[in-house]
Amino acid sequence: MARSFTDRMIGAATLDVATFEEVEHDESATAQAAGVIALVAAAQAGAAFGAGPIGMARAAGSQLIGVGLWCAITYFIGTRLFGGQATVGEVFRTVGFALSPQILVLLALLPLIGGLIGFALSPILAIWVLIAVVIGVRQALDVSTGKAVMASLLGAVAYVALSIIVPGL
């Protein structure tokens, strides 16, 4: 029996391999993965509240564009270079749910200490999400952890490069 949306987000955030296997194989979880991405984009926008409406829109937009790019490049590298066996949907679902920990960026909105928490939490969330993405990609592509790390990192590098090349992302 499929777990609830919230249970799947918690499972992904706690790096539960069974959760990633479940969402990989459940095509109906595509909308849920998109929901996670949308929630994270909204959380990014909320965390950028002090930057005004344009800053908030950039934060949400960069999340949406970046995740799409990350998924596409990870899929391409994983299947073409590393011999992984997956559909784009399987990679999208696992990567989408792997972003679940990023909801915690909303802690940056806490009065008085939010800025400090946001500053300290940012690198922790980046590493946490990258680990979750690697697990998800490994399960989706059915490749070794090393190949999943390489595919995920190359996808992440492309995302970061895009954010440098396109100002405001």
Image (cartoon, helix red, strand yellow):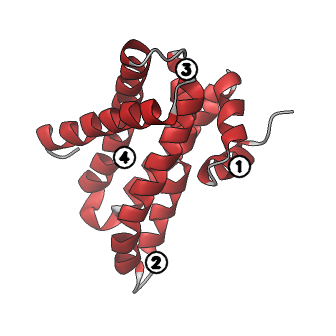
Crowd tier of the residue under label 1, counting other residues whose Cα lies within 10 Å: few below 14, some 14–19, many 20 or above: few
Image location of residue 100, percent across then percent down: 55, 49
Q: Amino acid at mark 3?
A: Gly
Measured in 3D between alpha carbons, the distance from the residue under mark 1 to the one under mark 2, in whole angstroms, is 23 Å
Measured in 3D between alpha carbons, the distance from the residue under mark 2 to the one under mark 4, in whole angstroms, is 19 Å
Image location of residue 126, percent across then percent down: 39, 55
Which tag, 1 or 2, sits closer to the chain's start? Answer: 1
Q: Is residue 122 left or right of residue 37?
A: left
Q: Amino acid at mark 4?
A: Ala
Q: Which residue is mark 2?
A: 110
Q: Nearer the viewer, mark 1 or mark 2?
A: 1
Residue occupying the point 53% across, 46% down: 132
Q: Which residue is mark 4?
A: 60
Measured in 3D between alpha carbons, the distance from the residue under mark 3 to the one under mark 4, in whole angstroms, is 22 Å
Q: Which residue is mark 3?
A: 89
Q: Nearer the viewer, residue 64 or 17?
A: 17
Measured in 3D between alpha carbons, the distance from the residue under mark 4 to the one under mark 1, in whole angstroms, is 21 Å
Label 3: state its secondary structure.
helix
Image location of residue 37, percent across then percent down: 50, 40
Q: Nearer the viewer, residue 99 or 18?
A: 18
